[in-house]
Image (cartoon, rainbow, N blue to C red):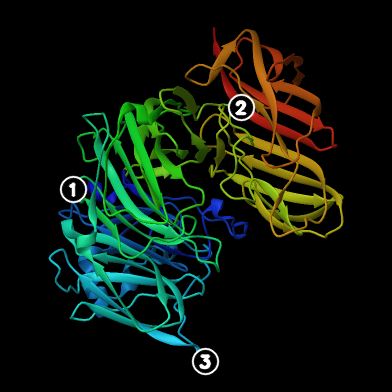
Amino acid sequence: MTRSTKYVAGVIAIGAALALAAAGNGEAGTTTAPAAAEIPSGPYTVTLRTGDQVTVADPAGSTLSVRPGPGRAGMRFAVVRTGGSVYVLPRDTMAQVRAGAVDKRQFDVASLVRAQYRGVPQVPAGVQPAPAGADDESYDLTIRYLDRNGSPTQDAFAVVSGWDRNVADWPPVDAGGTSTVRLPKGRYNLGGYLGSGPDTALLVQPVVDLTRDLTVTLDARAAGPVALTVPARSARMGFLDAGFSFYPSYQSWPAGMLLSGDRVSGVRIGQVGAPAAPNAMIGTVAAQWAKPDGADDFTDSPYLYSVAETFPGSLPNGFTRDYRAGDFGAVHQRFAATAPGQTAMRTVTPSFTPPIAGVSALIVPTTLPGTRVEYHQTGVRWTAELSPGTRDDGGYFVAQGKLYRQPTAYQAGRAYRDQWNASPAGPAFGQEGESAWQWASRTGDEIDVALPLYGDRAGHAGSLVPTDSSRTALYRDGDLVGEFPRSGRGSFTVPPETADYRLEVADTRSAGELTTRLSAAWTFRSGHAGGDGPVRLPLSAVRFTPALDADNAAPAGRAFNLPVTVEGQPGAPPARTTKLTVEISYDDGTTWSKASLQAAPAGWTAMVRHPAGARFASLRATAADATGATVTETILRAYRLAAG
């Protein structure tokens, strides 16, 4: 099996290019919970007819990486998202697709991946081209394309999108290098790709005010190169992307276009026409660097550099910057292993407010345990993820969960420390969810949950862990509302009247020796939630943060202090903890002993004595707050015990 058929490091493009799908970035204000059917965790890989490889993290294609096929280094890709389709179009296929000689559906990677998995829900159709009505006042928009020599070119591709009406059109380009499309009177955004190879450019005219027949020229000579450097001499650029996002008035998520390149295929960008309002369009440039591993990858790179620039209202005509050490905050990362032979995929992405339509991240394969220093540009918030897993006999990476840190900003000249994937694993609510309704909320009379049941010792939110069996159930005044065979996930319709609720989760696992069973139950009162947005429920998590060795073990045969905290869900009303009990078991939950608790500055300390000869410690805790809400958690085999 060749390397190109395996899941290897690449670039993840999140909501890249023409982001007109019906589901958006969590920061866009989207409040809809996932569909009821469970979506299996990825990644999934398809090979295009050109030999290029596309890996998507989920069947909807919400995140993807593109890797040129053999002999195609430096190939550029246009990523176009419309409705339930995600097209990844290599630049050398554009002419054939435009002419109708090649069906563009052959490049719809989301449909190709979803077709391989039964029971995966299809993404609802989003924005589609909308022709003018008979009574609409309409005009012709003519687009002329000029190459870097100033000559007309057919080697171009444009997207016209409405600012104030639901219209999106990809007009064909004729032999004379011109497109003409008839559209209703109004304001439009015009973006286009011109050229191929090193001449590829992304141009935008932020606002086209169509009040008469109009001609707009997209001139590749207006685009300038993007050139960036970082201090590490051994660093190699993993990706460089640039593009723009704009915010139509009829939807709550952005639209836009993205052009990606790397050290081989540079990026050229530019703008024609006047800028948009600063809050209406944002231009972006982002890049990441790591140390190459000698096999055309970045496995176990000792460092990662990440930069992201924004340009409110415009896209610059090229951008050059040589970054210095003072432009970054340094985060010293430590990645733990919970099982022998474990590896992981590491990604860090910039987080923008308002959200943008396209952003990327370098996938860095990381052997566990391991370390890395990550240098993040100041003035930007960064979201980090670690997906632990293993490689199967064929060399494919098989994810065994996802750990997530909320968007975080770092200061220049400061050194930060963070640890990932260390036991014990259990519910952790300290991180802000990726969407407004997470982790558990009520919107009107719909209760949605997607609980981070497998947070690590540092409190990173953990989910998508494979289980042997799972159950998530909701009771109202003692009666079952509904249940799902899924790990901490479900959507429940409830009556509007205020009532007592009990949310139960229970997982069993045989993958690995730790956290073989995890269960929890929350009780709370809830009634109809007014307004259009979600209201987060008063759920809490009891967290254990013992000092364990590299094998996630504590010493047997001696006294041991176990730090304990209780944390509420961000955005839920805070409430004082009024009662806490902690129990420990050394026979996988057959018998339990109550631990003595002492107050500590950050919570409590449970004082226990691990018996000699015991192999594992299991934990159980119950907490209640001043509102009467309670939580009970049980973690079998929370951590190991070792002699000495």
Asked if labels 2 and 1 touch by Cβ distance under 8 angstroms, the answer is no
Q: Percent position (x, y) of residue 595? A: 75, 17
Nearer-the-camera pick, 353 or 483 = 353
Specify few, some or many for label 3: CA neighbours under 10 Å numbering under 14, 14-19, or 20 or more.
few
Asked if 216 appears above or below 220 in the picture, the reply is below
Query: Which-is-in-front pick, marks 3 and 2?
Result: 3
Q: Amino acid at mark 3?
A: Asp
In the picture, the disc for residue 620 is: none
Q: Distance between the Cα atoms at labels 1 and 2? A: 49 Å
The residue located at (54%, 29%) in the rendering is 513
Q: In the image, is 423 to the left or to the right of 274?
A: right
Q: Earlier in the sequence, mark 3 or mark 1?
A: 3
Nearer-the-camera pick, 636 or 577 = 577
Q: Percent position (x, y) of residue 271? A: 31, 60
Q: Amino acid at mark 2?
A: Arg
Question: Residue beneath label 1, please?
Answer: 264
Question: Residue beneath label 3, please?
Answer: 135
Q: Percent position (x, y) of residue 501? A: 81, 48
Query: Which-is-in-front pick, marks 1 and 2?
Result: 1
Residue farthest bottom in this picture: 134
Asked if labels 1 and 3 touch by Cβ distance under 8 angstroms, the answer is no
Q: Amino acid at mark 1?
A: Val
Question: Residue beneath label 2, please?
Answer: 637
Q: Secondary structure at mark 2?
A: strand
Q: Percent position (x, y) of residue 243? A: 35, 56
Asked if 365 appears above or below 119 in the picture, the reply is above
Q: Secondary structure at mark 3?
A: loop
Query: Which-is-in-front pick, marks 3 and 1?
Result: 3
Q: In the image, is 40 to the left or to the right of 183?
A: right
